[in-house]
Amino acid sequence: MQTKTKKILKRSAFATLAVGTLVFVFLTFKRNVKEEDAEKYLSPYFTVNDMFRSSTATKLGIDNTTTDKNILLNIKTLFMKVLDPLRKAYGKPFSITSGYRTKAVNDAVGGSYTSQHTKGEAADIDAGNKSENQKLYNLIKQMGEYDQLINENDFSWVHVSYKRVGYNRGQAFKQ
């Protein structure tokens, strides 16, 4: 009798786990921007070249561009979900100081091997001074659409990321 009960409990636990996993996957992918929406999207404020621009790449003669469709979709999604709404709420221009990075550029700047910059999911932004950068940080935090939001070096710049595919963690911290 005990063996039969154990089998029933195992099956029940497995079924509960499976259903929970399916619900999590559904909710995660429901948040994602549809590929066809991102492909059509053009930013009123930014270009893909703003994300490719890199003083390090220029200095070292590294091509910091890509034609990878997933990376380009990630960049457009970052514009659509974070940077364009931020620019509109902020009411004035700010710069993308570091966007997409090839592996070579990421290595040259000492970036993490897991950096979201290499996937086109992250941008470092700067509004010209620390107090304006703090305003950007607070606006992003208030708007709530981000994966990671980092106050870098006492608001010397702000790092923000967004995942087109997967769960956005909403982590905010300083480095």
Image (cartoon, rainbow, N blue to C red):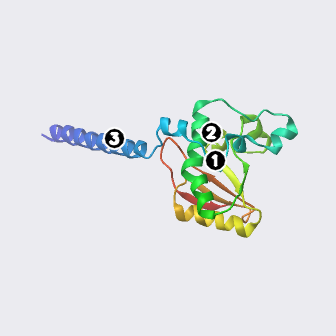
Q: What type is the residue that disc 1 sits on?
A: Ala
- Tell me whether circle 2 and circle 1 mark residues in contact (CB < 8 Å): yes
Residue at position x 57%, y 56% in the image? 85
| Secondary structure category for the residue under label 1 | strand
The residue where tag 2 is placed is 119
- Toward the bottom, the furthest residue is 131
In three-dimensional space, the C-alpha distance between marks 2 and 1, rounded to whole angstroms, equals 8 Å
- Residue 130 found in image quarter: bottom right
In this rendered view, identify the residue nearer to me: 18 or 34.
34
Q: Secondary structure at mark 2?
A: helix
Q: Is residue 73 visible?
A: yes
Circle 3 residue: 22
Q: CA distance from mark 3 to mark 1?
A: 28 Å
Which residue is disc 1 drawn over?
Answer: 122
Q: Name the spot of residue 173 as percent of width and height, x first.
A: 61, 61
Who comes first in sequence, dot 3 or dot 1?
Answer: 3
Measured along the vertical axis of the image, is residue 134 above or below residue 65?
A: below
